[in-house]
Image: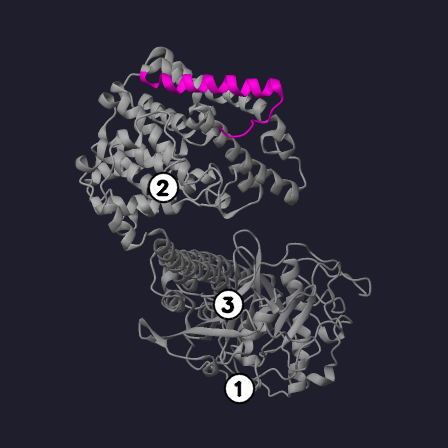
Amino acid sequence: MVGSWFVETVTSPQTSRGPSRSPSDPSSSMLLLGRGRDTFPLSSPSLRISTSASIPSLSQPPSHQTSTLSTPRWSDPLTLERAGSCSPRTPRSLHSPVSSRSLRCPHSPRSSPRSPRRTRSCGRGEPCGRGEGCDWMMKLLAGGSGRIGSVAELCQGALLHALEVVGAERCSLSLLRQDQDGCRGLVQVVALTGGPGCVKEESSSNHAHLELVKGILGYVVATGMPMNMTGDVYEDPRFNTDEDQTAGFKLKSVLSVPMKNSRQEVLGAALVLNKRISADDQGSLFTDQDEKVLACHMGLLGLVLDNVQLFERSRQEANRCQVLLTLARLLSEEQKSMENLLGKMAATILPFARAQYCTIFIARDRPKNSFSGLVHMEGEEQGSEFQIYKRDCTLPDIDLTHALQVLVSKETLNVSGADQDPPTGSLVCCPIRNGKTGKIIAVCQLKNKLGVAPGEPETGREFNRYEERLLEDFAVYCGLALQTVQTVQRIEYQRASQDVTQEVLSYHLTAAEEEIRALQEADIPSAQSLRILDFSFSDFGLSEESTAQATVRMFLDLNLVQDFNIDYKCLCQWVLSVRRGYRSNVPYHNWSHGLSTAQCMFAMMTSTDQLQSNLSRLEVLALMIATLNHDLDHRGVSNSYIERTQQPLAQLYGTSSLEHHHYDMCLFILNNPGSQILSGLCPDDYRTVLPMIEKAILATDLAVYMERRAEFFELGQKGVRWEEDRHRDLLRSMLMTASDIAAITKPWHIQKRTAKLVASEFFAQGDREKEEFNIKPVDMMNRDNSTRLPHMQVNYIDGMCHPLYQTLSGMFDSCSPLLDGLMRNRENWMLLAETGEEGGEEE
């Protein structure tokens, strides 16, 4: 029974993680046990063993011999698997039930005498089995986890001692283990034979012995109960074994005990065959004392194995945390390229997985199931150090078979090199997914497990479940790395695209050099001649050159050029750029409206002593820049239309989309080379004036005005406390609104013409809403209500304009012309509403 074999639990079909063995495969060395069955036959057609397993001859020298099919190491946290605690019932087909703790063959005579237990000393002259007198136990307990060694070494020491104290011809120890497919079964860790009189047997008899003992071990592991068979086991109907097949060596006595941990969970089982007391006596039986001694040793061994395994699992978890923390740190660092980042990540996992190669294959979108590139790292053990190298490889240099298989199946693949024909290195390969879409964007692969034990073939090691899980965690971080790098690349691309767009926009916004020179060299008319000091100002009769000159005059008369060291040519280019920033095809919100808004602010500043004495120079500068730029690049539609049509502006800003865009355009022109009128400001003033400009432009959104006007009306009654920033901010916002809607206060002929321009712009938006959304626009944008324009103007004056100008006139007497003009226009609109006219011809 010294052959190599495996007891596997049959599970439901699932996606294979690697090459699986078929139960009917004659080359398989597995013994299958049903999981969750009500019965457990000691011999069943579902249990089999391959005769191709390597079975040493029993005629070997009397010295202890060791066979290690698979030597699990403590690097595998799943080396020991706990068996179920349920005890399967004996099948009805058995002629007699399985007995209790000390199991005897039902056909052996119950009165069969047991040989007396010979007292064996095990150090200190005390019989082994008393614990404190056992040198092996004391040495094991005093050794510590750091000096225990591998599983095979620990189990071999225990089995050597058991073989001696129990006096058996042969013994073996098997541990529960879970394979790559999740099947749980027994793996023989070590098997020994000792003592004189070994008889050579044929392979058929060896096969028969394996058929006998496999059911016994399976029963012991499944039930957690010992089994002591003392009769003629070949006559037991529960075994399909012919005694003629076992000529030369017979099983006279069999003792098997489970190995458990402190929680009474089964970790494996020990098996001893044929009690031997003297060289000429081969017929002895294992006694209850032998059973107790073996159980005592296996109990201690189970505790030690369980504790060492727990220690190893904690160490591996610490290593895993270290890997993940290192990967997270790499993700937080700025990397020069994707290859550089992935190379560092691959170098992180290599020493912990003890792999020779780590390769990351980058998937290609088209054609599908192909790769566009790879990152390949190589590791090498040099004594206590682990050296890592980056290899310059291309796709043709690497075997893509398993990577392509994972790319198609989208499942982790674990391949043992010994399973391949011809044998190759071990390999584990798993997909890398996009965290958002779940799409496979790459495949990572570890190949050739390092740290092969002496005498073990290079292809004998395989990546265990711990390393497989570590690679799957690694794949998550690789997916994040790829997404991060791709995001950075997209950002860089968009930044480059934005730079190109800004370059084109700057070119079109910048006036020609001749135009700039003409304005720079022109004699700027006085404010009186341009009539920009009057609230009744209108640019309807001015040429484009005159509007630009009027703008320059306002900055000159407010001493802004002198106070802030504004270069005069820079000011001229800035004014012309702002004029270019307005769309000429928009009926109302164009350059004419921008200039009129700035002129109203200028008139209030120059005519109101309280504003001149209490507003800072930076506030005056901010208000003049804001009024002139407050509708830059207006599209002739409202914010609600932009949001309803889901235009990019709505996606960028969300609320007050147009006003945010106007401010961004203002900044763009201020930063445009040659138009930087704020370049003379100190850093502190520059950081102060920009938020003022932004708030002032955002205040022109009438929705913002409606939210804050109640507070302003209260401020008008109590008076402004100029030392409070909130009062000053609120006042600046209301001054912006008063300047923005000042067309309602202009002389009647200007007001009536302006109202028609506003109506045409609103009606155009209403027409688009009807066509695009098949909805009825609001009244002021519905062309069907064009005859009701006077009524709508009266409502607009009463609801929106009159409270503002009344409060402003109450605060500053110089602003009363605005209120007076408003009331005159209301009377005219009311008259038209009563007579049913639409507004008549322009006067």
Please give the residue where the numbered disc 1 appears in the rendered image: 60
User: Which three-letter amino acid code belongs to the residue tagged 1?
Assistant: Gln
- Mark 1 Cα shell of 10 Å, populated few (<14), some (14-19), many (≥20): some
Residue nearest the viewer, comparing 471 with 396: 396
Q: Is residue 513 above or below residue 782?
A: below
> What is the span of residues highlighted in magenta in the rendered image?
814-843
* Corner quadrant of residue 106: bottom right
Give the residue displayed 53% in from the left and 46% down from the top: 647
**Residue 809 got which mark?**
none
Q: Residue at x 47, y 40 (%)?
A: 657
Q: Residue placed at 56% from the left, 62% from the top?
A: 439
- Which amino acid lies under the numbered mark 3 shown in the image of this protein? Ala
Q: Residues within 10 Å of mark 2 (few under 14, many from 20)?
A: few
Asked if residue 34 lies left or right of residue 442, the reply is right
Decide whether residue 119 is among the magenta residues. Answer: no
Point out residue 155 in the picture as x, y percentages from the top left corner: 48, 68
Q: Which residue is mark 2?
A: 543
Q: Nearer the viewer, residue 314 or 547?
A: 547
The Cα atoms of the two marked residues, 3 and 1, are separated by 54 Å
Q: Is residue 830 visible?
A: yes
Is residue 127 shown to the viewer in this render?
no
Q: Which residue is mark 3?
A: 442
